[in-house]
Image (spheres, rainbow, N blue to C red):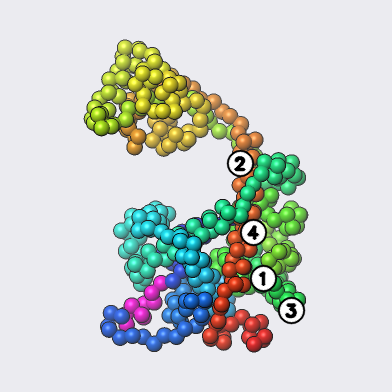
Amino acid sequence: MKHPFALLLLALVAATALPAQAQLLPQAQQDATASGTQPLDRIVAVVDDSVILQSELDDAVRLVQQQYAGNPGQLPPLDVLKRQVLDRLILMKLQLAKADEQGIRVSNDDVDRAVAAVAQQNHMSPEQLRAAVEQSGQSFAAFRSQLADQLVVQRLHDSVVRDSVTITDSEINNLLNSPTYKAGEVHLAHIQISIPAGGSAADVQAAQAKAQQALDAIKGGMDFNAAAIRYSDAQDALEGGDLGWRRLDEVPPAFADVVASMKPGDVSPALRGPTGFHILKLVGQREPSRQVVTEYHARQILIRPSELVTPEQARQQAQDLYDRIVNKHEDFAKLAKEYSKDPTTANAGGDMGWFQRDQWGGTIAQQLAQLKDGEVSQPFQSEAGWHILQLEGTRKSDVTDETERNQARQAIGNRKAEQAYEDFLRGLRADAYINILVPELKNPDARDKA
């Protein structure tokens, strides 16, 4: 399942341009504010107690066009793009309002960490990211505001999923024993044509006709990603409907049999699902493989600074213990039991058991890579204090069964989470007051009904 915040990062990597649902202060409005004049604007949609301005829509559309500047042919006609972007803005307003109602907030520190994460994704420092954003004509304050909105929506998503998704051992066992579980992973793209909650027969017929339109366009030579951008109303439409790699068992059961019979490059017919019609493309497929990892057995001594022990005293004590182990050949386990301040290993003579390399953190992992069996490390520092590490041995372990069980749990959770949040969004929209004031921005079907 694609993570909303992950989508944001991907968009930033592409062009430091945010997804269409993010709202930036339009450049024209910034210029007008600086000159002391107020630009003319209009309300294009009313969403419960909030509004969407023409300037918000124009700016969001501009960002999508900027993101596809290298391949503008993949974008739908401008009127269709505006409707898609407006739909995202509406959904964003509804989610933010719901999050506010539930008391979901983010702090400046949370946003600072998000900025740092985006910078790291783009191989930049935060200062370089700021310069890049401003160079693109965007306000960095508005950029931070968008990040804050994305974090709020992600926390709303997590809250909805946490409250509605449970996974039992029997579900995991059933999945592990199913034929589809052994089928490996598939890379999918999709087009979703939604049916409104409580939709009528006419709504179903209109959705089916639109799905057929999309299929006809693909058969006529249109690139699948371009068709997704033009026809799909899923949240990932403007990313070309790419679902990424997932195990076949993560695919909803109603579609799994169809996908299992497809070959890379194949496109499915329009499939009816709980929320509408879906068209799937199998981009790629890979077989499952055994998971063999290197495990390490080690002991450690940890000396922590405290109110009674200064950092320098902790370093010196660790050095003294290292000398006693290496030069005086004293027993590592005995010294660990006597001096180590790690509550999880001290009583066991510093024994850390068998573990995978990164299980105890990156600092210890770096030291392990430099040690041979039986060797003792020089004292080294981490956030916890000063460590001495002794590598007891290494082994290769087949963790396929454990990995498969974890993957099965994740697959069930992802599948349930996708459906739960999709249902949540459909209900959110169905219960909201939404009035699109500009006729050309209304869905053609809605215009016909009006």
User: 152 or 113, which is in the foreground?
Assistant: 152
Kind of residue at disc 3 = Ala
On-image quarter of the N terminus: bottom right
Kind of residue at disc 1 = Ala
Residue 260 appears in the rendering: yes
Residue, disc 3: 202
Which is more N-terminal, label 2 or label 1? 1
Which is more N-terminal, label 4 or label 1? 1
Residue 16 image point, x, y percent: 42, 64
Residue 67 image point, x, y percent: 47, 69
Image: magenta residue range: 24-32
Is 26 placed left or right of 284 in the picture? left
Which mark lies nearer to you, 4 or 2? 4
Q: How many neighbours does mark 2 have within 10 angstroms: few (below 14), some (14-19), or many (20 or more)?
A: few
Residue, disc 1: 197
Magenta-drawn stretch, dominant element (helix, strand or loop): helix
